[in-house]
Amino acid sequence: MEITRQNKLDRIKSRALELIKNVTIINIKAKKMKLIAYYDWKNDSVIINENMLDTLSEGCLTYIVVHELIHKITKTRNHDARFLTKLISIYDLSNIIKYETEITAFSISNHISRDY
């Protein structure tokens, strides 16, 4: 059975909401772009690179969505101490390294900006 992109996005959204307790609603959109992902402050949405949906593991995609939602709940656009403290409260260091490595490999092979 083929998994549609929307089904995959729905599963990622559900898992992200389980991991981040103080967010109840999220919009996730996939689109073609030269970035990994970003949090769209104006539209309160997580935007992810659609090419990642067919390439990265669901665990990694969930990590990316959680990463972007941490920007929302910490109200920061950078990766300061508040951001990192929240990230480490959700993911242990071994998973952060695993997912960041997967993202970096995707970025390099697809010539996509590593910033997200």
Image: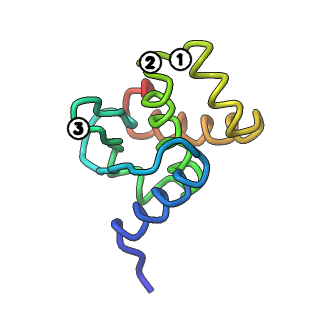
Residue assigned mark 3 = 43
For the residue marked with disc 3, what is the amino acid? Asn
* Residue 7 against residue 18 in the figure, above or below: below
Query: SS of the residue at dot 3?
Result: loop
> Image point 50% across, 60% down: which residue?
14
- Do the residues under discs 1 and 2 have CB atoms within 8 angstroms? yes
Query: SS of the residue at dot 1?
Result: loop
Between circles 1 and 2, the one closer to the viewer is 2
Query: SS of the residue at dot 2?
Result: loop
What is the distance, in whole Å, between disc 1 and disc 3 at their CAs? 21 Å
What label does residue 76 carry, if any? 2
Nearer the observer, 22 or 86: 22
For the residue marked with disc 1, what is the amino acid? His
Residue assigned mark 1 = 79
Q: Quadrant of the C terminus?
A: top left
Residue 56 as seen in the image, left or right of residue 115: right
> Image point 59% across, 54% down: which residue?
18
Q: Provide residue 87's location: percent of width, then percent of height.
A: 63, 31
Mark closer to the chain start, 3 or 2 = 3
Residue 14 as seen in the image, left or right of residue 92: left
Nearer the observer, 86 or 63: 86
Q: Alpha-carbon neighbours of circle 1 within 10 Å: few (<14), some, or many (≥20)?
A: some
Q: Pick out the residue farthest to the bottom.
A: 1
- Do the residues under discs 3 and 2 have CB atoms within 8 angstroms? no
Q: Provide residue 67's location: percent of width, then percent of height.
A: 52, 35
> Image point 53% across, 41% down: which residue?
22
* Residue 82 against residue 106 in the figure, above or below: above
Q: Alpha-carbon neighbours of circle 2 within 10 Å: few (<14), some, or many (≥20)?
A: few
Q: Alpha-carbon neighbours of circle 3 within 10 Å: few (<14), some, or many (≥20)?
A: few
Mark closer to the chain start, 1 or 3 = 3
- Give the quadrant of residue 4: bottom left
> Image point 71% across, 33% down: which residue?
89
